[in-house]
Image (cartoon, helix red, strand yellow):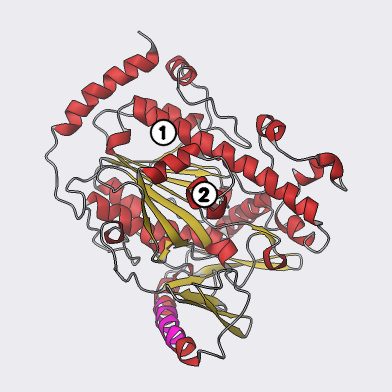
Amino acid sequence: MAVWDRCLLLAGVAAQVFCCAAPASGSGTGVFPRNVILIVSDALRPDVLGAYGGEASTPYIDSLAEGGVTFLNAFSTSSWTGPSSVSMLTANYPTSYPSLRIVKGDRMVWASMVPDEEVLPAEVLLSAGFTTASYVENRLVTRNNVLQGFSTFLESADLEPLTRELMAESPVPIPLAGKKTPYPVSDYLIHLGEQERLFMLIWFLDPHSPYKPHSEYMEDLDFDSTLLPRPPQFYTRVSGIDLKALADSLSRIETDYLKTLYLGEVESVDRRIGFILSILEARGLRKDTLIILTSDHGEAFGEHGMFSHGHGGFPNTLCHVPLIIAGPGIPGGKTVTCPVSHRGLAPTILDFLGIEAADTPAGKSFKDLMYEDGIDYGPVYLVDVTDNSFAILDSNYKLVVSRGDTALYSMRTDRDEANSVASVHPHIVKELITAAETIRESNFRRRVELETRQPIASESDSRKAGIIDAMRSLGYIH
């Protein structure tokens, strides 16, 4: 019997085991999922995905949307990985934590310091009996202390013969990754114990710059590279602040080529996700698993003169992210238009699992939005590691306070943020500033409290060195 068939047979046995568990009553579903997998694709714009009407071929991501709920207005709390990952994995704002100032040359950046004594959502799940595992390709996420509670960190390793045979028989083509492969994740899922309950974080670095898709995707690119003013390999190497520095000199055709390379990486991520979904199907885990797909931020290709990410002003191009949730009992093909924040990810996961933490996460679950219409989620607040600048938005307007300027944009008619209407609606500006100040004050009080328990200098120095190394690898600094 082929390995793939054996896995399907095991899936039937596993289904009997799972079905014997007494269903727990949960809002909207009636049954809690057995496992949760959070997939993050770094720097992924929603508007390139098929599920969002984009031009990339993403059949596997689209299948998640068809079988689940797509949030049309999900926002990261910031425009780059450092602060956004803090909110995603702690349910708190980055400004509610102490910060490190890092000076490199003429650049100064800040990094949040999540204390060791913080009880993070993954630790709550670990204490509740879950197996917690993470596969994270973005080195900054591994250095800012947001992975507390993950007991297993997956690294690339030699695959066992069973895994190789199973992968060869997968109905999904073997993924050809731009930077990494999903094999460590697949190997782990194949060998997951039948009685285990799993919370897994999968963080793909693609399509983060440099945009260098696998040669197979390069061959399929519909682009005449002979028209480029520079060698094609130049565009597959440039990234981060070097890419930002080229903003004024890049021609339209160069911008189009960079976007085409980016789309190739997006499609390679889709195939990796499809491969993992096929492993879940083979193991009989898919029907009992809540799957969440999102990104830590977007990516700019010339909008407002921006390239890459990490720019100030919290533009929608960089803070609007995809969010798709699929799993047992979740309505298929539904869309949610209400704006939601990444701070709600961890509370939503705990909500679906029916787990109440002693220290309730500060974020707000958006589970009810998936089953009921007309619910007001409340304003979405955006901020960096420091709160010198911030933005706050609802379904109607977005207020941006940055570098001494205040701008107000219509979320309904000006998603490109081209024309501020702050002078036309001063009362709305006042209302949103009042709401933002309440959040800022709460973050300030919490940060001051944590700063009284600042880690010893040697620990701070060690973390700073790790963060600097990670930022350099991502092109944030030289």
- Residue at the far top: name it: 1
Q: CA distance from mark 1 to mark 2?
A: 25 Å
Label 2 packing within 10 angstroms: few (<14), some (14-19), many (20+): some
Give the image location of residue 356, x and y in percent.
Answer: 22, 57
280 or 132, which is in the foreground? 280
Q: Secondary structure at mark 2?
A: helix
Callout 1 secondary element: helix
Q: Could you say where residue 371 lies in the image, as x and y percent from the top left?
A: 26, 57
Residue that sits furthest to the right in the current view:
229
Question: Which of the marked residues, 1 or 2, is nearer the chain's N terminus?
Answer: 2
How packed mark 1 is, by other alpha carbons closer than 10 Å (few <14, some 14-19, many 20 or more), is many
For the point 62% across and 79% down, which residue is it? 419
Main SS of the magenta segment? helix
Q: Determine which quarter of the picture holds residue 386.
A: bottom right
- Residue drawn at the location 45% of the way across and 76% of the way down: 396
Q: Is residue 450 above or below residue 342?
A: below
As displayed, is residue 460 above or below residue 312? above
On residue 142, which mark appears?
2
**Residue type (three-letter) at the residue carrying disc 2:** Thr
Of residues 472 and 232, the one nearer the viewer is 232
Which residues make up the magenta segment? 431-442
Residue 191 is situated, as x and y percent measured from the top left of the image, at: 36, 25
Question: Is 215 situated above or below 43?
Answer: above
Describe residue 120's horizontal placement relative to residue 245 as left or right. left
What's under tag 1, amino acid-wise? Leu
Considering the image in quadrants, where does the C terminus appear? bottom right
The residue under label 1 is 277
